[in-house]
Amino acid sequence: MAVATTPKDAQADRFPVLIQHQYGETTVQSEPSRIVSLSFIGHDFLLALGRPPHALRKWFGPHPYGIWPWAQEALAEATPIVMQGEIDIEAIAAMQPDLIVGQWSGMTKREYQLLSRIAPTVPPQLQYGDYGTPWQEMLRTLGRATGRLDQAEEIIAGIDARFHGIRQAHPEWQGASSVMVWAGQNGAYSARDIRGQFIQALGFEVPDAINTRASFNNYYVLIPPEDLSPIDVDALIWLDAGGSVSRLERMPLRPTLRAYTEGREIYADLLLSAALSHSSPLSLNYALDRLVPLLEAAMDGDPATTVTSTAEAGLLPEGF
């Protein structure tokens, strides 16, 4: 993916920038050059803006620097420091950053106070909580903090236009029910989560049975195997990091779900699940490329139409 740049003198005119957030406000006085990204997915957003972080917080996966395939071209020759686990204040101080960003990091107020003594620090906005910020707002905030807001808005417009086009092409999806569920333990994502936001951007609705069980800072609802009714939806998307196919096969009540009996289950493998879980400007197009054809097969009204990913995982009902 080619990433446009903004002339340095134009960027300088954008500072200082005041960013309000859940712990107060942060002023970025000048264009940063050593950015530490504490968000589990934030490095993707910085890469989309052509700003490889000095250090990043790896989430999961086997890829170098924690960068998944959709973002590797944007990483180019950069070699960021990789952090994992809890936020290490002393290690971050030793990096001498001039900007610390963590909109999807779980950063506590105490951690923010300590990090702010090191460099301007940007946690999430108050109204979204720790992990509820829409991808557009995450990118927009980073665009402001790095002097690349115009570029951020251009990226947002392009991806939003693609979602709009898909909605227009599929009126039958509008208002239909769908939910993404982590297959490892039946964890359903509410509409406040980025995965729920993704499916709703296509026109589907996450059921109230999921949304009403979620709280402000908990977007993941465990569904007991003895009552799967909250995920009895028109299009059921199983996310899997690998190893949960046998669990799905053994789930006693799964055959009672409409999506199972009518061939409307979609199995998302590791790469697609990761793309949906990052929901970044670099992973969204990959996720749409793969998921939309699967949704089309699941929602065409013909139970005989095979959802290829589900078939390849060996999860189709007997006789399909």
Image (tube, grey):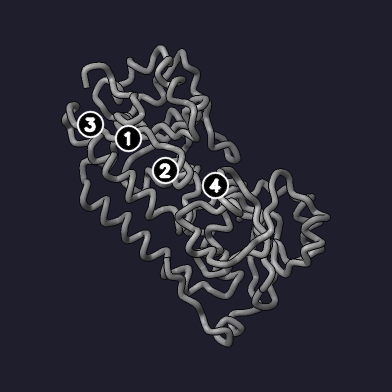
Picture coordinates of residue 284, whole percent (x, y): 41, 53
Q: Nearer the viewer, residue 84 or 192?
A: 84
Locate the N terminus and report the quarter of the image it occupies. Answer: bottom left
Q: Is residue 181 above or below residue 92?
A: above
Q: Nearer the viewer, residue 306 or 25?
A: 306
Report the Cα–Cα distance between label 1 and label 3. 9 Å
Labels 3 and 4: the sequence-earlier one? 4
Q: Nearer the viewer, mark 3 or mark 4?
A: 3
Mark number for residue 272? Answer: 2
Q: Which residue is mark 3?
A: 306
Tell me the quarter of the picture where residue 209 sits: top left
Q: Which residue is mark 1?
A: 309
Residue type pointed to by label 1: Ser
- The residue carrying pointer 3 sits among few (fewer than 14), some (14 to 19) or many (20 or more) residues within 10 Å by Cα, namely some
Labels 4 and 1: the sequence-earlier one? 4
User: Of helix, strand and loop, which one carries label 2?
Assistant: helix
